[in-house]
């Protein structure tokens, strides 16, 4: 099914609401057309086109809530889905945490849709991959990669008069190039709303350089090192901090933001004063939806300002109970930096390790946000401001809180995407002292 | 649903509004409707429309999967039900070979016109992509089975158990924890029913009804003075079973340090024990880093097997198909060809098995119509085989696929996924208690916790839910901040004793992630309690 226009979505949602007999009813509608191509061993492997739609009906009688969804949109199916939501609500136990749906809101339009991305088809994807494969073959390397584009829409309407609509496009590309002997490996990942910003050749060439220069790595002793984290490496650590900024968990005493006696660290300086992290749905490099899944507007929010924890996100229920603003979790975060390039950070480093990618990140201790994982696809020793030689991969055990207290320098933020969660963010490269590597890995 | 999405959905503090902000994977349905499968004759007709359309557009091979995927998800905390969700996802995926290249398209509106269009799209993608091929796809031969069916051998369909009974069980579990002094308890029950139909141009029409379930909880207790908190998760296992898994049975219990469970689970008893454990964890002493002999219970070892044996023996990783995402493997073909690569000690034997009753990966036929079977991967410590699908079998010189193909939805393309991979129990009679008697300085580990391994599966780090000190053959108190780090080959060569079959249990991963776009699969790993000599243990305690 094609992407529904605002008018088409509005008409469909109105029709669904007209069938409701519940005290309150809210309907969410979304759909996407997506295409992808995957390659490995310098050859295309699997690929496909996926078209999906979903309509979610939430019906409430008092504090009893029922949810039903459907992916067929004829009148009979729409009547059936409303009836199912209402029947489920009748059977459900009363939920003391149910909060009445939001009334009408005003949302500015989201700058998230780009026509050139929506126009992509199998040929555009194949052409892009052909260019990537050519670079791999020219450099006698082995390529594996993935290119995916999608066009999506989301809309919601409820019996209290709220209506929201948004369209969005996205394209993401990532590639790993390995030397023929398997001793060197390099990676690049890019994600945009606008296909015309995607430089497949540039990203592949960058991965090719890392692959060639990371071959025959030397082993260094594990221990504490000054590291320079490229944005893709920094994000997979920092996102665990963002995910953990739930106000209720902090209040309940089970997060890194908790203090004894039901208190939290909100308002306290937890990290270096140069750390500023915020979200902004209108940032030109990383636009996101202006409304969250339950209809709350998404606005510019400072999460960490000059190292001080400024805001946490809350469910509407918990915010109401605490008598505070119900700030939703952000769709994407932005960390401020400086004008320094990655090369500038390297030049200013006497001894250190350049980490281009981190992998298999898992929480070890939620109370300290201690994480473990490994370096991957190009790790290099820096001496006197220059990259001297590639080093073998390390396992690390480190907390982003400790890391942001050991901040030495920040570079210029760039849009990157997490290899762990697929989350997009604007993150600067960063130099960190005393980063803890606990063992060596033979992996390339 | 991607693994991360599930973790989000199942996370602490889930409310209805949060659920709406995660990707919706299906549609809710009245259960009585969902339990009546889509008519097989209709599925066959729709499948033939797709197969004929693909052939008419130039496909030399085509298969079609019509899937109805049902999930029921119940989450509770303390004295309330947070969410009851019944989802259904129905649609069709068409996979073709044209000009020697794979193509795939999936749709959720199954009219004949849409099916024909999707088949044409799949062929178009294959033809466009064929220009980027280095060699055409080579499929191992596979006979058509005609019209056949298979069903998970369940005693009680968990979807048919009234919602009231299931929520009452979870609330009773929560009540036991709160009465035991817990500050918080989250419990959930996740049910899966895959009704899937496979048809191919080779003449198979396979109808399967697959069931899985996973009951779990997390008990949390906070020390009011220090503000420190500890948790203990359920020691249940996700299973390829019906609701009977949740009906306790004495014969399926093992008495040891505390009761542990085989093919039946006593959730109420486990939560009572867990609440006591959380208290002990708050009082536990930090581990001193160093070398220890590890006695690892199956509730922890299954995940180490999954990561360090299951994943590196996937042939697609070995060949480089996952190089950009899940990674490659240290178990390269030359090691297999040598016939003497010492993966583990002589007592280490791993079997792959897609037929094991009660396991998560058990099905009659895989998602490219290959009948399931079992085979050795590690025999007497030596690497002897991998896991393959039809387009890989020729690389190993195999006449047929090993039946390891799976897609997590009608909308996803099928590819190589892990079968159940299990450590065979020791042949001589040996109980965990007898094993521990001979350990001077060790740690006895239960339950899955943090886990991480590199992209070629050499270096790993795991921690557990419960880590008991062993000193001079006796079990002591709980230790905290324990994580064991090892190199896969060194670890399995340090395997010095395996308990007998009386102690054999399966653990499982319900949401194993792999592929781009990322897909999940469910897989079990069986083993008995096992002893590893001289493994490196680190202390993970930090201050912020």
Image (tube, coloured by chain):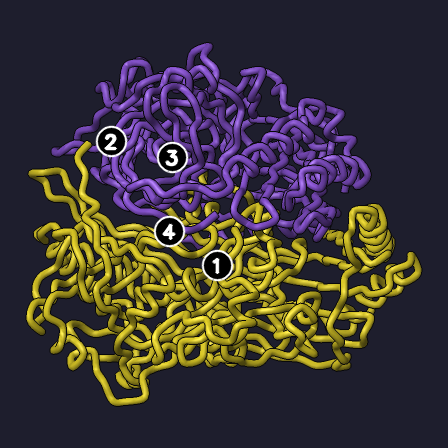
Chain colours: A purple, B yellow
Q: Are marks 4 and 2 in contact (CB under 8 Å)?
A: no
Could you confirm whether marks 4 and 2 are on the same chain? Answer: no
Residue at the disc numbered 1: B330
Residue, far right: B56
| Number of residues whose C-alpha sits closer than 10 Å to that of mark 4, classed few (under 14), some (14–19) or many (20 or more) | many
Residue at the disc numbered 4: B452
Q: Mark 2, mark 3: which one is toward the viewer?
A: 3
Residue, far bottom: B428
User: Which sits in the foreground, A277 or B118?
Assistant: A277
Q: Position of residue A444 (x, y in %)?
A: 48, 47
> What separation in Å lies between label 3 and label 1 (alpha carbons)?
26 Å
Q: Mark 1, mark 4: which one is toward the viewer?
A: 1
Horizontally, residue A145 falls left or right of residue B278, namely right
Could you confirm whether marks 1 and 2 are on the same chain? Answer: no
Q: Are marks 3 and 1 in contact (CB under 8 Å)?
A: no
The disc, 2 or 3, on the residue closer to the chain's N-terminal end is 3
Q: Mark 4, mark 2: which one is toward the viewer?
A: 4
Q: Position of residue B112 (x, y in %)?
A: 85, 57
User: Which sits in the foreground, A79 or B325?
Assistant: B325
**Residue pictured at 54% horizontal, 42% vertical:** A185
Q: Are marks 1 and 2 in contact (CB under 8 Å)?
A: no
Q: Position of residue B478 (x, y in %)?
A: 12, 59
What label sits on residue B141 in the rendered view? none
Q: Mark 1, mark 2: which one is toward the viewer?
A: 1
Residue at the disc numbered 2: A257
Horizontally, residue A374 falls left or right of residue B325, namely left
Residue at the disc numbered 3: A237
Q: Chain of mark 4?
A: B
User: Which sits in the foreground, B203 or B268?
Assistant: B203
Secondary structure of residue under mark 3: helix
Q: Are marks 4 and 3 in contact (CB under 8 Å)?
A: no
Q: Is residue B88 above or below residue B530?
A: above
């Amino acid at each position: 099914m094609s992407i529904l226009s605002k008018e088409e979505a509005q008409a469909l949602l109105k029709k669904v609401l007209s069938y409701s007999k519940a005290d309150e009813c809210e309907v969410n509608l979304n759909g996407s057309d997506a295409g992808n191509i995957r390659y490995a061993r310098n050859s295309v492997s699997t690929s496909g086109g996926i078209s999906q739609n979903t309509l979610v009906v939430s019906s409430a009688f008092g504090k009893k809530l029922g949810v039903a969804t459907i992916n067929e949109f004829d009148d009979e199916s729409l009547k059936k889905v409303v009836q199912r939501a209402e029947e489920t609500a009748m059977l459900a136990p009363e939920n003391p945490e149910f909060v009445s749906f939001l009334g009408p809101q005003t949302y500015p339009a989201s700058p998230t849709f780009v026509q050139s991305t929506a126009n992509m088809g199998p040929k555009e994807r194949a052409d892009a991959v052909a260019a990537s494969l050519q670079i791999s073959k020219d450099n006698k390397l082995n390529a594996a990669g993935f290119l995916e584009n999608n066009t999506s829409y989301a809309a919601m309407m409820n019996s209290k008069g709220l209506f929201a609509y948004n369209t969005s496009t996205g394209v993401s590309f990532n590639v790993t190039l390995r030397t023929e002997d398997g001793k060197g490996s390099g990676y690049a990942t890019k994600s945009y709303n606008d296909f015309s910003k995607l430089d497949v050749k540039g990203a592949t060439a960058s991965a090719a350089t890392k692959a060639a220069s990371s071959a025959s790595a030397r082993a260094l002793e594990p221990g504490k090192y000054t590291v320079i984290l490229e944005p893709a490496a920094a994000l997979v650590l920092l996102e665990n901090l963002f995910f953990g900024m739930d106000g209720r968990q902090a209040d309940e005493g089970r997060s890194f933001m908790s203090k004894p006696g039901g208190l939290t660290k909100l308002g306290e300086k937890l990290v270096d004063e140069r750390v500023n992290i915020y979200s902004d749905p209108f940032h030109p490099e990383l636009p996101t939806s202006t409304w969250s899944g339950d209809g709350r507007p998404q606005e510019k929010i400072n999460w960490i300002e000059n190292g001080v924890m400024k805001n946490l996100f809350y469910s509407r229920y918990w915010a109401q109970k605490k008598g505070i603003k119900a700030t939703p979790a952000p769709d994407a975060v932005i960390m401020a930096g400086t004008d320094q390039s990655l090369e500038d950070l390297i030049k200013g480093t006497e001894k250190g390790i350049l980490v281009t990618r981190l992998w298999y990140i898992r929480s070890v201790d939620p109370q300290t946000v201690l994480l473990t994982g490994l370096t991957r696809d190009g790790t290099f020793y820096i001496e006197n401001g220059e990259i001297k030689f590639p080093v073998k991969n390390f396992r690390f055990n480190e907390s982003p809180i400790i890391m942001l207290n050991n901040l030495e320098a920040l570079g210029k933020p760039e849009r990157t995407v997490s290899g762990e969660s697929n989350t997009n963010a604007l993150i600067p490269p960063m130099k960190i002292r005393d980063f803890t590597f606990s063992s060596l890995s033979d992996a390339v | 649903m991607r693994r991360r999405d599930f973790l989000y959905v199942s996370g602490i503090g889930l409310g209805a509004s949060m659920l709406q902000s995660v990707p919706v994977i299906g549609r809710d349905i009245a259960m009585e409707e969902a339990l009546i499968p889509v008519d097989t004759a209709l599925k066959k007709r729709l499948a033939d429309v797709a197969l004929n359309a693909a052939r008419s557009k130039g496909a030399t091979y085509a298969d079609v999967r019509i899937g109805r995927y049902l999930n029921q998800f119940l989450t509770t905390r303390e004295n309330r039900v947070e969410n009851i969700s019944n989802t259904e996802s129905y649609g069709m995926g068409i996979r073709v070979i044209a000009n020697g290249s794979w193509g795939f398209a999936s749709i959720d509106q199954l009219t004949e016109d849409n099916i024909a269009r999707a088949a044409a799209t799949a062929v178009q993608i294959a033809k466009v992509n064929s220009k980027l091929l280095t060699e055409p796809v080579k499929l191992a031969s596979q006979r058509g089975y005609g019209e056949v069916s298979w069903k998970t051998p369940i005693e009680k369909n968990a979807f048919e158990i009234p919602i009231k009974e299931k929520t009452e069980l979870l609330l009773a579990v929560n009540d036991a924890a709160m009465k035991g002094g817990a500050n918080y308890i989250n419990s959930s029950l996740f049910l899966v029913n895959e009704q899937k139909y496979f048809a191919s141009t080779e003449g198979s029409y396979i109808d399967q009804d697959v069931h899985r379930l996973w009951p779990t909880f997390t008990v949390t207790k906070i020390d009011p003075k220090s503000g420190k908190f500890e948790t203990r998760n359920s020691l249940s296992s996700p299973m390829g079973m019906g609701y009977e898994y949740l009906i306790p049975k004495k014969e399926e219990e093992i008495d040891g340090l505390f009761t542990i469970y085989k093919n039946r689970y006593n959730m109420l008893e486990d939560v009572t024990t867990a609440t006591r454990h959380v208290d002990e964890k708050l009082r536990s002493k930090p581990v001193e880093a160093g070398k220890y002999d590890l006695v690892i219970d199956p509730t922890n070892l299954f995940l180490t097997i999954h990561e360090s044996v299951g994943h590196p023996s996937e042939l697609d990783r070995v060949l480089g198909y996952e190089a950009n995402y899940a990674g490659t493997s240290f178990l390269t073909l030359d090691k297999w060809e040598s016939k003497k690569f010492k993966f583990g000690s002589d007592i280490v034997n791993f079997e792959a098995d897609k037929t094991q009753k009660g396991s998560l990966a058990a099905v009659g036929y895989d998602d490219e119509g290959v009948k399931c079977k079992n085979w050795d991967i590690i025999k007497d410590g030596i690497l002897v085989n991998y896991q393959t699908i039809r387009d890989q079998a020729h690389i190993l010189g195999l006449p047929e696929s090993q039946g390891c193909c799976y897609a997590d939805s009608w909308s996803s393309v099928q590819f190589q996924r892990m079968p159940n991979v299990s450590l065979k129990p020791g042949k001589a009679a040996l109980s965990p208690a007898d094993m521990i008697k001979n350990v001077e300085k060790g740690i006895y580990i239960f339950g899955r916790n943090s886990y991480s391994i590199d992209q070629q599966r050499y270096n790993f780090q795991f921690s557990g839910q419960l880590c008991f000190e062993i000193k001079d053959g006796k079990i002591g108190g709980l230790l905290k901040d324990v994580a064991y780090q090892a190199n896969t080959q060194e670890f399995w060569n340090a395997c010095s004793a395996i308990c007998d079959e009386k102690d054999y249990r399966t653990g499982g991963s319900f949401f194993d992630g792999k592929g781009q776009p990322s897909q999940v699969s469910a897989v079990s790993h069986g083993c008995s309690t096992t002893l590893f000599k001289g493994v490196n243990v680190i202390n993970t305690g930090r201050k912020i």
